[in-house]
Image (cartoon, rainbow, N blue to C red):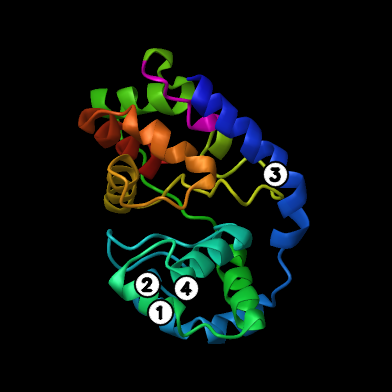
Amino acid sequence: MNKVLGAVIVVVGALGAYGSAWAAKGDPAAGKEKSALCHGCHGEKGMSVAPNFPNLAGQFSGYIKKQIRDFQAGKRNDDTMSAMAATVTEAQDLEDIAAYFMSQTSMKGAATKGSKADKGKAIFMDGNLEKGVYGCKNCHGETGKGKSADNHLFPVIGGQNKDYLLKQLHDLKEGRRTNDPAGMMGDIAKGLSDDDIEAVAEYISGL
């Protein structure tokens, strides 16, 4: 748990330095046209056309920009997205595309009920100290919509597609995705069982 808390301190301490760098400087109107190629997977308004693609509606522009840059730099890999990211060669285009998706009505899921969602809510809210799992709300906010407009390192996750959440959590747990700040999400995912991941994904997707 100390390792996770240490990572939180490192990341939070970096927010002041990153805040101005991640501030939205794009033009959403221009971004709508420039993001046309994105619409085939993520939808025209940022709500994806298939559950394995992430929703981008209302996502922080700074987070979107970081992920595109990480795909371009090979810090994150996906056959489709790595190729798509490579087509964004102008900095202003990236600013505009990210601003466009951030300007859309935030992603929203259909709330689910039952023991699985209840278990997921408990993990989301309180984590599991024995397993070194930090509660998701501490970084992503109680509704999963983020805690601060200036904090782009922790993305909007409330209402994200369950299938996408499942894949990302398993990739983080198994080391296939490693571009999370200070390795914090990887450490948290390693403390989650497969049942825990299923439960927390169920709950988050319904926010």
Residue in front for this viewpoint, 153 or 163: 153
Magenta residues, start to end: 131-138
Q: Which residue position holds label 3?
A: 14
User: Is 3 on the left-hand or right-hand side of 173?
Assistant: right
Mark earlier in primary sequence (4, 3)? 3
Q: Secondary structure at mark 1?
A: helix
Q: For residue 145, which quarter of the picture?
A: top right
Please tell me which of labels 4 and 2 falls first in the chain. Answer: 4
The spot of residue 56 in percent (x, y) is: 47, 62
**Residue 35 at x, y = what percent?**
50, 81
Marking on residue 84? 1
Amino acid beneath label 2: Met
Whether tag 3 and tag 2 are in contact, CB under 8 A, the answer is: no
Gap in angstroms between the C-alphas marked 4 and 3: 23 Å
Q: Which mark is residue 72?
A: 4
Q: Are marks 1 and 2 in contact (CB under 8 Å)?
A: yes
Determine whether, in the image, residue 136 is placed left or right of residue 104: left
- Name the residue nearer the viewer: 138 or 178: 178
The residue labelled by disc 2 is: 81
Q: Is residue 93 above or below residue 75?
A: below
Q: CA distance from mark 1 to mark 2?
A: 5 Å
Q: Residue at coordinates 62% horizontally, 60% vertically from top-left? A: 62
Dot 4 falls on a residue whose secondary structure is helix
Measured in 3D between alpha carbons, the distance from the residue under mark 3 to the one under mark 1, in whole angstroms, is 29 Å
